[in-house]
């Protein structure tokens, strides 16, 4: 099997793969979209002047979904699960794009606070953790998470100038950024008590936790499996010398 290179799945199954993806996406949207639209519509009917506030909420959730997708994608990449679906450069590019998209949306989400007439934020309150007039601890988690995510995204673009070890070390910060975003959404989000938002956070956190444990487990098992081989090789080298 040595030297065999994966060249992607057969083009004859592309229709089936896209069909399954569409069914999965439809199931998720069908389960969550009606409740989300109902909540947004109710808020719009209550106060039609709160367009900025609505945009803040929408962009916040989109940013969180993009970050979750990026983290999940990264864990699947590290376990080489995605190698059975597409070429690694393609999947890595999508992982990087999701992270960049999430950071961009989160940045706009934060800056819109300066335009919110109900509770306007100053520039310092937007940028400096702990100064928020609303849920300062939870908002601080989100601010720190955004800065950490920005560092990770920047490291991806600087990868040619970084060692593999340094790049991997920086990427571990992704999990802290995800925790920060989750705490921020639950603690500072006005929709966190809604069932659809509640399950969104639980589902995202559960998926990341499961894949992280799986990644750690496979790494430990691989290391344990390599140990006897390494010892046998060392003993053989000692006997030969």
Image (spheres, rainbow, N blue to C red):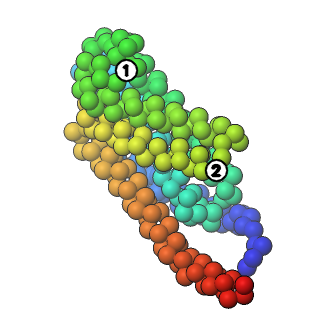
Disc number for residue 128: 1
Q: Nearer the viewer, residue 85 or 83?
A: 83
Outermost residue, left direction? Answer: 193
Outermost residue, front direction? Answer: 241
Residue 129 position in % (x across, y down): 34, 24
Tag 1 secondary structure: loop
Tag 2 secondary structure: helix
Q: Residues within 10 Å of mark 1 (few under 14, many from 20)?
A: few
Q: Nearer the viewer, residue 154 or 50?
A: 154
Badge 2 or badge 1: first in the primary sequence: 1
Q: Is residue 218 visible?
A: no
Residue 54 position in % (x across, y down): 35, 24
Residue 51 position in % (x across, y down): 36, 18
Disc number for residue 228: none
The residue that appears at 21% across and 39% down in the rendered structure is: 193
- Which quadrant: the N terminus? bottom right
Q: Is residue 199 visible?
A: yes
Judging by the rendered image, the residue that carries numbered circle 2 is: 164
Q: Residues within 10 Å of mark 2 (few under 14, many from 20)?
A: few
Q: Nearer the viewer, residue 61 or 80?
A: 80
Marks 2,1: beta carbons within 8 A = no
The residue that appears at 65% across and 46% down in the rendered structure is: 163
The residue that appears at 36% across and 38% down in the rendered structure is: 180
The residue that appears at 65% across and 37% down in the rendered structure is: 157
- Which quadrant: the C terminus? bottom right
Q: From what the image shows, is residue 239 above or below residue 127?
A: below
Is residue 226 toward the left or the right of residue 162 in the image? left
Distance between the Cα atoms at labels 2 and 1? 32 Å
Residue 221 position in % (x across, y down): 48, 73
């Amino acid at each position: 099997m040595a030297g065999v290179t994966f060249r992607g799945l057969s083009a004859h199954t592309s229709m089936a793969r896209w069909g399954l993806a569409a069914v999965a996406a439809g199931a998720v949207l069908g389960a969550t979209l009606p409740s989300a639209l109902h909540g947004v519509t109710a808020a719009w009917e209550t106060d039609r002047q709160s367009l900025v506030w609505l945009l803040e909420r929408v962009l916040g959730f989109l940013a969180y979904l993009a970050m979750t997708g990026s983290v999940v994608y990264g864990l699947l990449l590290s376990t080489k699960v995605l190698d059975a679906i597409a070429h690694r450069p393609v999947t890595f590019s999508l992982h990087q794009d999701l992270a960049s998209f999430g950071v961009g949306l989160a940045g706009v989400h934060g800056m819109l606070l300066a335009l919110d007439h109900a509770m306007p934020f100053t520039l310092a309150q937007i940028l400096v953790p702990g100064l928020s007039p609303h849920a300062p601890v939870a908002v601080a988690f989100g601010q720190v998470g955004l800065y950490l995510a920005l560092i990770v995204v920047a490291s991806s673009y600087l990868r040619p100038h970084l060692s593999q070890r340094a790049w991997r070390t920086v990427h571990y910060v992704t999990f802290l950024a995800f925790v920060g975003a989750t705490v921020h959404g639950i603690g500072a989000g006005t929709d966190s008590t809604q069932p659809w938002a509640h399950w969104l956070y639980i589902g995202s956190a559960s998926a990341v936790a499961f894949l992280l444990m799986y990644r750690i487990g496979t790494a430990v098992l691989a290391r344990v499996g390599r140990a006897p081989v390494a010892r046998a090789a060392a003993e053989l080298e000692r006997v030969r010398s």
